[in-house]
Amino acid sequence: MSYMSAIKKTNRYNNAGGIFPSALNTTHALIAIISSIQKKASSPKKSNKLILMFFYLWLTNNLKKINSISDIPDLVKVSGSENASPHALRIFRSDGISWAEYSLNYQHDDETYLWQTVPNYINHFFTLQLQEKMSYGTPLLNNKEKDLLLTILKTSWEMPAQIKHRTKSRKPQFYCYFSSFIALDPQVPVIAKYIFLGKDALHHNSARYYQKTNSDYIRHSIFETQTRALKRLSKVLNDHAYTLYFDVHGEKQSLFQQLNYDFISKEEDDNNKPPLIKSYIKEKHGSRWEKKEIAPLTIGSLRPLDISDIRKFFKSIGTAIDNKTKQPNMTTKQLKELYTLLTYQIACEFLILTGCRPTHSISIELKRCFNLSNVLVSDKGKFRTLFICEYLKQRITHYQSIQHVLLNKLGITSTPSTLWFLIDENNEAKPLNAKLTNQFIQKYWPGNAVTPANEIDAYRFRHTVAQTALNHQDPQLTSQQIDKLMGHSKLGEHYGNDQLLPTHKQTLLSFLNELPKLFELNNYK
């Protein structure tokens, strides 16, 4: 394999939807380190404290950063009335359910921390330790215990009898299990990946600039992906009858326990958005404590447009076109005016129904359009496939019929090699460009829109498609499918290097076929 081919293969492997770390080898490594902690700790109480610190560092992707005692944080327990702060744990009780939470940094350039729900399977262990072993405001480990944990992390782990002669993950891979899993999990939105991994670890860094979400959705995404990561390990434990336990008052309890919970919710006014986990804080009113919802933090791009604005915009174009078509005995001049409106309309529909970049020429080249079933566009110097929904195919066909009539009337034989184009005052065909499209959009942008007309440009349609793809639930797109839809790719993922399975293509087409209804494009002709 050549050097370039190896890079291409690595990029495809690292994309969301790649191969997860070995669950079997990771489970063996987990058994080995838990066994080492339990053997070297002087008492079950210290053992549980070390295991709790290990899981906290593992969940937060900090194990790889531990090189000295000073690198091990002072992990403290705080009450439900306190906001999240660095290296803090708390228990929050709601509707009879106690669940542990840890603080997570939500902005990598400042000290913004929010509460993150501990994943299922290990919440039972976390809550017991917080309730019985930790005091408020007191660090979990003293320096002697930190030194013991550091020694365990830096030395070889003895393989207990149940996994003797079995292979286990190497420490660097084991320490990064959660970060590797989240990076490859296609069900995790790119913004949630950014919050957990940081921008340097994102496969397609530019993808996060096209979407926005809030911390409640991110909290749910991270909770679910960490739960899925632990579920794989729990399955290995059950399938191989491995034992992994911790001490509770002299009795052994399974370290992995699946619990029922009901703290996942959806917005009441919008069922077409993903689930969320709200965060609360306790406030005292007189002698009574009440929980108060913490306002979520919005993260990501502010460029996606409100769907109601998109609907009003296309309705205003449709009204203008209807007024033109109602004219009796239409003259050639009037037909040309109608054709101009239809050209801008089809260009705007093309942008909002494909997510294509509105670059220099906003159209489809004839030589790269194959019966509208397969369309190639040049995107940042590389070709990529565009998927055309059924509605847009019909609109293009209707547009071309009117275009054919007008060209015959004007006797125009020389035209650009694109599906749609303008005809100027000299009856010469000229390509449509981004500047003219932006001027048209601002002219017909509704005056009562959420976003004012002077802030609108054609590129924001692309952001809107990406945001709609993120929020859409039926079908629900993976982060890999959204990247494919938007043309985000690296070397080895460009046209001619990757393959799209039929089931994934059908999912993308199903989503695109829903957009005309969502944007109410069927409400005008």
Image: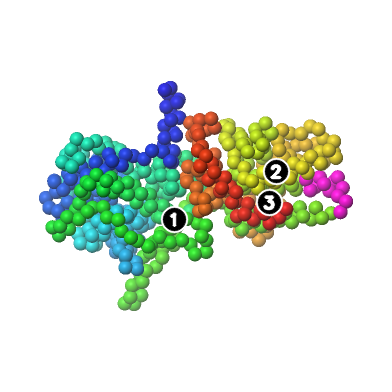
In the rendered image, the quadrant that contains the N terminus is top left
Q: Position of residue 479 (x, y in %)?
A: 47, 45
**Residue drawn at 51 percent across, 42 percent down:** 503
SS class, disc 2: helix
**Residue drawn at 76 percent across, 52 percent down:** 321
Return the residue at label 3: 442
Return the residue at label 2: 396
Camera-near label (2 vs 3) is 2
Camera-near label (3 vs 1) is 1
Q: Residues within 10 Å of mark 2 (few under 14, many from 20)?
A: some
Q: Residues within 10 Å of mark 1 (few under 14, many from 20)?
A: many
Q: Position of residue 286 (x, y in %)?
A: 34, 77
Q: Which residues are magenta?
A: 328-339
SS class, disc 1: helix
Q: Position of residue 102 (x, y in %)?
A: 32, 55
Return the residue at label 1: 217
Question: Are the residues flagged by discs 3 and 1 in contact, CB closer than 8 Å?
Answer: no
- Magenta stretch contains residue 483: no
